[in-house]
């Protein structure tokens, strides 16, 4: 038997299979309450579904026409130009593209832990090195510590804001300061997968910071508030020169005509956007308050999920929840993360968690 690993590029030989979102077969069960991957329980929007269904008719044509329309529409929405944008098969593909484009063996990729899982794996695929600094109190992205960790080998920085899995947001103004002092030969990605859920009044997206003076790339996705995680559309915003370089890794077409049609229609469906955001804001508050009442330490969230310390045996909690077909996510102890679902899903989760915690105390 041939071991195909031996044919792989050397840095990849030690890699393992990435399991997105802690996927388990049991999640396919109709009884499953999926609060483990920050999916939108409402989406896609009805208007997007209609637009996508229509595009099926044109499924035999390459998607250049609709990608062109969508890019124009997106540029208008962002108040940018199409030359500032690159489209991807979800922002996960954009993360991979940064490795393909920029990482040589020995380069350093800087992150603040804990953060989004995909960044951790990326450097090893290119024999590059992951450099981690700890978050303040284990929860808040520490840009000062990140800046202090920059070396002549630093090539790529990932800042997730708001951050997954902690749900925390950078202090207003901090990111602008950080980006302004970074050398231009370091690519700084700000991953805004969760920016739509932010309710902090002083929050400003990093898109407004993109300029010729910096090497900032902002990632966004249609997987979250627009409910299109299974359809795949994400994008990167950067200055035109960087954007043109980035486009060199994109191949013919990242993403597809169905996703472009859905994304284009979603942007305009403000009613759906508001409905989904309002549910998240209300339910995030409700879940947080109810968990607090159970003696759980809840990290105040600006996202569509909640990071919490239940002060109990997390392995047992996960097993007991899964027995009830409720799926959440486990991180390094003492933390678990639950996505905000529909009210009835959240209530089932809360009731189950209360019962499990009481049982564990017996
Ligand atoms: C921070 C962050 N970035 C990127 C992604 C990837 O999203 P997608 O590839 O669905 O756009 C996720 C998915 O959960 C995420 O949490």
Image (cartoon, rainbow, N blue to C red):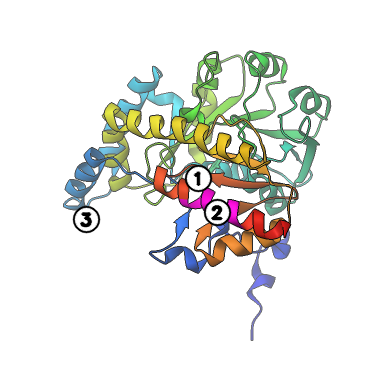
Observer-side mark, 3 or 1, equals: 1
In this rendered view, identify the residue nearer to me: 107 or 168. 168
In the rendered view, tell whether residue 19 sits above or below residue 267.
below
Q: CA distance from mark 3 to mark 1?
A: 32 Å
Identity of the residue drawn at 57% across and 58% down: 22
Mark 2 C-beta to ligand 1 under 8 Å:
yes
Q: How many marks?
A: 3
Name the residue beneath numbered marker 2.
21
Across and down, in percent, residue 10 comes to: 72, 61
Badge number at residue 38: 1
Residue 106 left/right relative to 291: right
- Lower sequence index among marks 3 and 2: 2
Element under label 1?
loop
Identity of the residue drawn at 59% across and 51% down: 354
In this rendered view, identify the residue nearer to me: 32 or 45. 32
Identity of the residue drawn at 31% across and 38% down: 67
Q: Is residue 193 visible?
A: no
The magenta span reads 348-355
Badge number at residue 322: none
Element under label 2?
helix
Element under label 3?
loop
Name the residue beneath numbered marker 3.
60
| Quarter of the view holding residue 32 | bottom left
**Whether label 3 touches label 1, CB < 8 Å:** no
Most frequent secondary structure within the magenta stretch? helix
- Lower sequence index among marks 3 and 1: 1
């Amino acid at each position: 038997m041939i071991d195909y690993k031996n044919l792989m590029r050397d840095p990849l030989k030690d890699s393992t299979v990435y399991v997105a979102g802690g996927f388990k077969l049991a999640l396919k069960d109709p009884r499953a309450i999926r609060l483990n991957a920050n999916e939108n329980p409402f989406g896609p929007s009805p208007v997007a579904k209609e637009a996508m269904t229509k595009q099926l008719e044109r499924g035999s044509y390459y998607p250049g026409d609709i990608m062109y329309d969508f890019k124009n529409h997106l540029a208008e929405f962002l108040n940018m130009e199409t030359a500032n944008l690159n489209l991807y098969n979800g922002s996960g593909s954009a993360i991979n593209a940064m490795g393909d484009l920029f990482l040589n063996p020995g380069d350093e990729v800087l992150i603040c832990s804990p953060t989004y899982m995909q960044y951790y794996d990326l450097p090893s695929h290119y024999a590059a090195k992951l450099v981690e600094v700890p978050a303040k109190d284990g929860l808040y992205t520490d840009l000062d510590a990140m800046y202090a960790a920059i070396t002549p080998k630093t090539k790529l920085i990932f800042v997730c804001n708001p951050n997954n899995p902690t749900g925390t947001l950078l202090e207003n103004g901090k990111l602008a300061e950080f980006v302004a002092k970074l050398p231009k030969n370091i690519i700084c990605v700000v991953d805004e997968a969760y920016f739509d859920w932010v309710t902090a009044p002083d929050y400003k997206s990093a898109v407004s910071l993109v300029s010729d003076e910096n090497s900032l790339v902002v990632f966004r996705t249609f997987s979250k508030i627009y409910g299109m995680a299974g359809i795949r559309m994400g994008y990167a915003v950067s200055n035109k020169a960087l954007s043109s370089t980035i486009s060199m890794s994109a191949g013919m077409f990242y993403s597809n005509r169905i996703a472009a049609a859905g994304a284009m229609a979603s942007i305009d469906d403000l009613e759906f956007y508001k409905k989904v955001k309002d549910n998240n804001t209300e339910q995030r508050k409700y879940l947080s308050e109810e968990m607090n009442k159970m003696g759980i330490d809840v990290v105040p969230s600006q996202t569509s999920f909640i990071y919490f310390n239940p002060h109990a045996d997390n392995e047992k909690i996960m097993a007991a929840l899964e027995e009830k077909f409720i799926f959440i996510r486990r991180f390094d102890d003492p933390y678990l993360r639950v996505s905000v679902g529909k009210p009835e899903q959240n209530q089932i989760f809360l009731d189950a968690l209360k019962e499990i915690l009481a049982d564990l105390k017996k």
